[in-house]
Image (spheres, grey):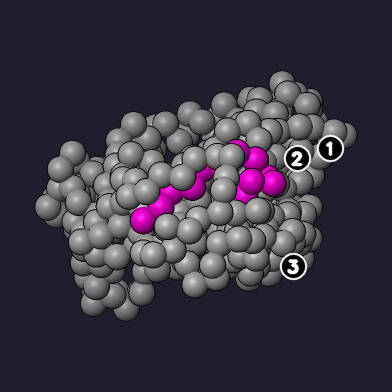
Amino acid sequence: MSWRADLPPVRGKLLPDEPLGPFTWFRVGGAADLLFLPADHEDLAAFLHALPSSVPVTVLGVGSNVIVRDGGVAGVVIRLAGRAFATVTAEGRRITAGAAALDSAVARAAAKAGIGGLEFYAGIPGTIGGALTMNAGCYGAETKDVLVSAWGYDRRGERRQLARTDFGYTYRHSEAPSDIIWVEATFEGHADDPAAVQARMEEITRRRETTQPIREKTGGSTFKNPPGYSSWKLVDEAGWRGKLYGGAMFSPLHANFMINTGEATAADLEALGEAVRADVLTKTGVDLQWEIRRIGTPG
């Protein structure tokens, strides 16, 4: 890792060999060769421009839908944090939000401004950057339904802006260039009564709290829903709900949510997911696909 001896100057923080587990909801995983916490947009762009192109770059949000493998992540892991990347503003029927803004914060800002159509974000425990990358959605609505445009920096530190149609969105998938680190996005809803929007948000929150293990060390939906199926039903019917696998299991409350019961490793979690995939494929012929991102190398 000779590249670490000749890093560009930054105004943010450069943290070598930083454990990444504490930055994820599962609380597992190894360290980053280098964790970069940029101070602002310009700091991020300058760092990317100066960083040798041979150094891998990985973006980590709030870690709500990711498993960091036990061997850690090679290269630079970039985590956007702080006010410079998390501002949320409303104007007319539009909301502009930084990539580090929580999805729930966007929903609250929209409700306060009397903008309907974005309340589904109250049910997604991630950030706007992640929502853009995976077309995040729940309860019948998705990012593609409300996105106007987004901009960020590519691996060379050059600004890139894409309209919604440029993303090529499908279910939990985007065709946008994978090297863009999203910085900000604009969404559009419709004029609505703030109290009505708030009421719908509260219903989404209640539904989530009663059906999902949100107070556990979890990672959101483990598998995408295959066409014509619900992943939780496939996992449940295969007999994996509440069944321990090392220190990991699928939640007794929601069979598509994995849980770190306290002693799980990243290897436990990923092996459990793969065991379930293989079992469901054998029993039903359905090939479950991961929704949780898995990054890094095995321990």
| Residue at figure coordinates x 70%, y 40% from the top left | 97
- Residue located beneath label 3 in the image: 166
Height in image: 283 above or below 66?
Answer: below
Of badges 2 and 1, nearer the viewer stands 2
Residue 29 showing in the rendered view:
yes
Which residue is tagged 1?
93
Dividing the picture into quarters, in which one does residue 259 lie?
top left
x then y, percent, for residue 191: 84, 34
What is the quadrant of residue 11 in the picture?
top right
Residue 49 image offset from top left, x and y in percent? 64, 61
Q: CA distance from mark 2 to mark 1?
A: 10 Å
Q: Decide: marks 1, 3 in contact (CB < 8 A)?
A: no
Q: Secondary structure at mark 2?
A: strand
Q: Secondary structure at mark 3?
A: helix
Q: Amino acid at mark 2?
A: Thr
| Residue under label 2 | 96
Three-letter amino acid code of the residue under disc 1: Arg
Residue at image point 34% right, 46% down: 18
Q: Amino acid at mark 3?
A: Asp
Q: Is disc 1 placed on a helix, strand or loop?
A: loop
Of pointers 1 and 3, the one earlier in the residue sequence: 1
| Circles 2, 3 touching at the beta carbon (< 8 Å) | no
Q: From where the camera sits, is residue 233 visible?
A: no
Q: Residues within 10 Å of mark 2 (few under 14, many from 20)?
A: many
Q: Nearer the viewer, residue 205 or 183?
A: 183
Which residue sits at x=41%, y=52%?
A: 34
Magenta-tinted stretch? 33-44
